[in-house]
Amino acid sequence: MKINTLLTILLLFIATVGSTQIKYEAKIDSKYKSIQLDDGSFKYVKYDKKKQTIFIYNIDNTLWKTVMLPLPKNHLLDEVKLISQTTFNKDEKVEVVYSCLEFTVPDNFEDPNVDYSKVNFTLNVITETGESLLKVDNSNMMEIIHTKGQTKMLIYKHVGESFNNNDETLIYNLP
């Protein structure tokens, strides 16, 4: 009797677990980027080009935060690199690292048949209120590393006209 009861329960459990399927939940009207915050929670990020604003949504698609991204004159958003709450400050304000770019044509450019433009990058670190924590010209790449109880931010800066040489790495100690 006990064996039959245990077998029945086991078969019901296997049937329930085995019959799970992928289930459609919702549709989002534009492209979102997913991120994971310092506390482990996941969010979706959407950029509004006209308003120069990112909208950060909870996993259930409810709006969590809105952050305006101040872009330098004639610049476009390149990429949102990092969104955190405690990487740069220990308060609960959201911090955003993003890069932007500007295409320029040199003044001495004479041949209209050759497609040449220079790309100028800027890496920015701001708070959710728009306060600038750091701005680095000629950079669009960074990484955060943890070593020996310290946290460092490495910013890769393009010093020369090409991406092949003359680069340097700026190292910042984070709290």
Image: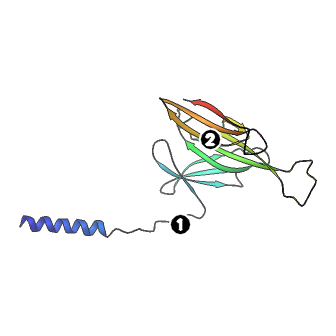
Image quarter hosting the C terminus: top right
Q: Secondary structure at mark 2?
A: strand
161 in the magenta segment = yes
Circle 1 packing at 10 Å, graded few (<14), some (14-19), many (20+), is few
Q: Amino acid at mark 2?
A: Met
Left or right of residue 64, residue 48 in this image: right
Secondary structure of the magenta portion, mostly? Answer: loop
In-front residue for pair 132/6: 6
In-front residue for pair 6/89: 6
Left or right of residue 149, residue 30 in this image: right
Instruction: Say which residue appears at 46% left-offset and 47% top-offset.
Output: 41
Instruction: Say which residue appears at 94% left-offset and 53% top-offset.
Output: 110
* Residue 10: image location, x then y, percent: 19, 65
Q: Is residue 128 above or below residue 31?
A: above
Q: Is residue 171 above or below residue 60?
A: above
Instruction: Say which residue appears at 55% left-offset and 63% top-offset.
Output: 28
Q: Amino acid at mark 1?
A: Lys
Q: Is residue 19 above or below residue 62?
A: below
In-front residue for pair 4/85: 4
* Residue 82: image location, x then y, percent: 58, 44
Question: Which residues lie in the magenta part?
Answer: 159-163
Q: Nearer the viewer, mark 2 or mark 1?
A: 2
96 in the magenta segment = no
Q: Which residue is mark 1?
A: 27
